[in-house]
Image: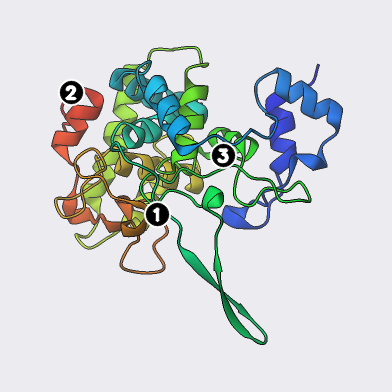
Amino acid sequence: MKNGKDILFSAYRTPIGWQGWDIQQEKRISDEDFAIAKEQGYMFDYPKSVSHGKYMERLSEVLKKITPEDAANAFLYSLSTRRLEYRSALGSYWYAIAIPEHERQGGHDIVIVTGSGSKTVKIPEDEVPCDVCGWFPWKKDTDGYKPVSDPNDFNFERYKWGGVWHSQGDYALFDLEQFLKLEKYPHTSEDEEILRRILDCIYTLESKDKAAKLQKAITSAKIFKSNKQEVETLLDILGICGILSSSTDPCYAEKFCDLYHREPPEIVNDRAYPLNRWRASDGVNLKRFRAVFGRDYVR
C-alpha cells in the first residue's frame, strides 16, 4: 500500500512560490490516494466549522492532556531525528496555554479597491477571525477551494517544516490534537547538546543582529540535519515559548499579545512574534529556558 505521508507531500510539493513551495490542493491527487492518506491519518476531509466557543472548549480539553514536559521532550527528540511533526507542538502549546479567556472579537469592515473606485464591505460575522487568538471559521469557497487554510495544509506544514502558524488558534488546536496521536519517545543527551549549540550561535553575532543572521549562523555551523526553512521555524518556536524574547517584547505566557500588535517595526521581517522583535543583544531568556525545558541553559 502507498505511504500516506508521501501522498500528502505529492499533493503539495511543487518547488515554486511561498518559501520555495507552491501549496497545491488535494484535488490534484486521485480519490483513491486521498482515501489511503486519510486512512493513515495524514489527510482529512474538509472540517465542519465550529463556533469560537466550541473551539475554546476543545482547546481547553486538549491542554489538559499535555504537559510542558511532553512538549519540551518532543521538541528535543525532533532535533537529532528530524521528526518535524514532533517539533511543532512546543510552539502551539505555549501559545495555546497563554490564550486568555475571552469572547470572540472581530467584525472589521474592509475596503476593496476597484478600477472605478473603492467600496467598503462588511465581512459576515461568521467569517471573521478572532482578533485575540486567531481562531478562524472554516469555510470553503463555492468552487471547493478554501480561502485560508485547512487541516491538509496544516499537516503538510507540520511534516515539512515543523509547522508555520503556531500562534494562530485553529492551527494550534489542530497541531495539539494531532500531537496526542503520536507515539512518545524520549530525547537523548545528543538532543540537549544540539539545542545548546544552536543557542550558542547567538553569541557569535553582533548585538543588533536579528533572527535572519542567527538562522544563517546556525545553518552554516551544520549543527544538525536541517535546512533554512526548518531553522527559521525552529527559531519562531523558541520565540513563541519565550526563549528568544525580550523584556520589551515578552512571550505570550508572560504578556499575551493579540493579533494586531504582533508585527515587527520593519516590513522585511516576516518571523513570528516575538522573534520578529528579538535582537542578539537580548540573548537567551534564562528564566523562560528553565520554565520550558526544566533545567538551566549553560553555555
52 left or right, relative to 286: right
Query: Is there CB contact under 8 Å for labels 1 and 3?
Result: no
Residue drawn at x 74%, y 37% is 10
Tag 3 or tag 1, which sits nearer the N-term?
Answer: 3
Residue wearing tag 1: 271
Query: How dense is the environment of label 3, judged by Cα within 10 Å: few (below 14), some, or many (20 and up)?
Result: many
Query: Is there CB contact under 8 Å for labels 1 and 2?
Result: no
In the rendered view, tell whether residue 24 sits above or below residue 253: below
Question: How far across and down, in percent of the image, does residue 276 sit?
Answer: 33, 56
Tag 2 or tag 3, which sits nearer the N-term?
Answer: 3
Tell me the number on the disc at residue 295: 2
Residue drawn at x 19%, y 59% is 207
Question: How far across and down, in percent of the image, does residue 71 sit?
Answer: 36, 23
In the rendered view, tell whether residue 189 sits above or below residue 262: above
The CA distance from mark 1 to mark 2 is 27 Å
Tell me the number on the disc at residue 230: none
The quadrant holding residue 31 is: top right
Residue drawn at x 19%, y 40% is 254
- Name the amino acid, label 1: Arg
Asked whether 252 or 199 is in front, the reply is 252
Question: How far across and down, in percent of the image, does residue 1 sit?
Answer: 81, 16
Give SS at disc 1: loop
Question: How far across and down, in percent of the image, does residue 18 sit?
Answer: 60, 56
Residue wearing tag 3: 157
The CA distance from mark 1 to mark 3 is 16 Å
Query: How dense is the environment of label 1, judged by Cα within 10 Å: few (below 14), some, or many (20 and up)?
Result: many
Which one is closest to the eye, mark 3 or mark 2?
3
- Name the amino acid, label 3: Glu
Specify whether residue 88 is in view.
Answer: no
- Name the amino acid, label 2: Arg
Asked whether 120 or 195 is in front, the reply is 120
Give SS at disc 2: loop
